[in-house]
Amino acid sequence: MCFLHSVLIERRRFGPLGWCVPYEFSQHDLTASLLFLHNYLYTDIKKGISWKTVQYMVCEVQYGGRITDDYDKRLLNCYGEAWFSDNIFHKKWWFAEGYPVPDYKCIEDYRAFIDELPTVDRLEVFGLLPTAEAAP
């Protein structure tokens, strides 16, 4: 969820290449999505995860409720389909090249993982071509 949020925020830097319409995603969007996810996952864990439900609630309701452009909505739904699925539990699955899903037992290992992430992200992480440039 946090990776999705950061990608959505960072795409704004690229002006119309990032989003057709500039959206004001905020910490509240992330908090609401995390609260939904927590409640959904811990209400009845025996049922398993309906990824279609998660995708719909995050991409159509929580974040998607702000989106007015059809192409932007398609993009967000593509992220949801790719990142909210059973694939995230596979050891060799990555959000993007160089961005695997960490699987550690203690918080110190997660912090070390975060410290090792690149300080400058490749544009492919945002779904952009390497020739895209940030808007002034």
Image: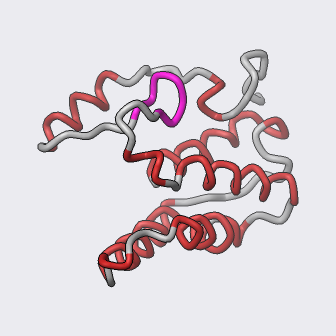
In-front residue for pair 79/131: 79
Quarter of the image that includes the C terminus: top right
Residue 100 lies, with reference to residue 106, above or below; the image says: above
Residue 4 lies, with reference to residue 103, above or below; the image says: below
- The answer to whether residue 78 is left or right of residue 17 is left
Q: Is residue 91 magenta?
A: no
In-front residue for pair 45/25: 45
In-front residue for pair 38/15: 38
Colouring used for the render? secondary structure
For the stretch drawn in magenta, the main secondary structure is strand
User: Residue 19's x, y, as percent?
Assistant: 79, 46
- The answer to whether residue 22 is left or right of residue 29 is right
Q: Residue furthest front?
A: 47
User: Residue 135's x, y, as percent?
Assistant: 77, 30
Query: Residue at (37%, 46%) from the top-left corner?
Result: 89
Residue 103 lies, with reference to residue 64, above or below; the image says: above
Q: Residue furthest bottom?
A: 43
Quadrant location of residue 93?
Answer: top left
Residue 48 lies, with reference to residue 105, above or below; the image says: below
User: Residue 125's x, y, as percent?
Assistant: 59, 30
Task: Give the magenta part as a residue range.
Answer: 94-100
Query: Residue at (59%, 21%) from the top-left corner?
Result: 122
Query: Residue at (67%, 58%) from the top-left corner?
Result: 24
- The answer to whether residue 108 is left or right of residue 93 is left
Quadrant location of residue 127?
Answer: top right
